[in-house]
Amino acid sequence: AQSVAQPEDQVNVAEGNPLTVKCTYSVSGNPYLFWYVQYPNRGLQFLLKYITGDNLVKGSYGFEAEFNKSQTSFHLKKPSALVSDSALYFCAVRDQAGTALIFGKGTTLSVSS
Amino acid sequence: DTAVSQTPKYLVTQMGNDKSIKCEQNLGHDTMYWYKQDSKKFLKIMFSYNNKELIINETVPNRFSPKSPDKAHLNLHINSLELGDSAVYFCASSQVALSGREQYFGPGTRLTVT
């Protein structure tokens, strides 16, 4: 069965520092991986995805993610964090039926000024 | 224009009542979904509809029933509401026919059962 794990409940970084939010996955077949962000009292916004191709994927708001097949990881990164990046981040994998998303438990990112 | 919209945004009701949440997407997508986010922020798929056919039905109580009058709408009906149904419900849509397409989410409906 497809699954993703986000090992950190919370990540704290100072503004201007690089940030990493971790995600590991377990899938049958090729992984279709996604990152979403949820701001307080808002819906989920799509950040980026990995389907195939380059292992470094660039997305919205300066975020990128590195797909590592040997480590079964898909970590979200940003070179310089902003206070406005503070939110709840979800990693997700497409299910085996190829339709719905299976989400990790989420990681709260807190960026301090 | 809002891509995926839901109404109402907030819904407060008593146990035993029947309620509906509406969802509409104007993206021309062929598949729509309902997700439930519980108080711990866990997100789980409930249903999805593709071309008016239910293609996923996770282990949710049969008190929950999705209704899709057309490709642009997927409503969620909930009968005999229980305290445990309190959660945020998100509607989403995607173009499944195009492999790997991301899903677009609505703003959510916060359901509180008292």
Image (cartoon, coloured by chain):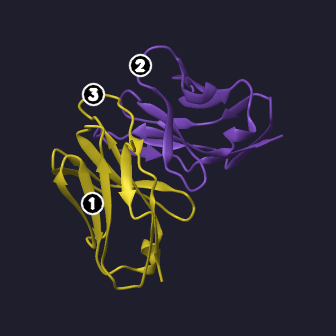
Whether A22 is drawn above or below B16: the answer is above
Q: Secondary structure at mark 1?
A: strand
Question: How far apart are the two marked residues, 3 and 1, measured between alpha carbons?
Answer: 24 Å
**Chain depicted in yellow:** B
Residue under circle 2?
Answer: A52
**Chain depicted in purple:** A
Residue under circle 1?
Answer: B75
Question: How far apart are the two marked residues, 2 and 1, measured between alpha carbons?
Answer: 34 Å
Q: Is residue B33 visible?
A: yes
Question: How far apart are the two marked residues, 3 and 2, measured between alpha carbons?
Answer: 14 Å
- Between residues B2 and B32, which one lies in front from this camera angle? B2
Residue under circle 3?
Answer: B98
- Is the residue at mark 3 from the same chain as the one at mark 1? yes
Frontmost of labels 2 and 1 is 1
Label 3: chain? B
Mark 2 belongs to which amino acid?
Thr
Label 1: chain? B
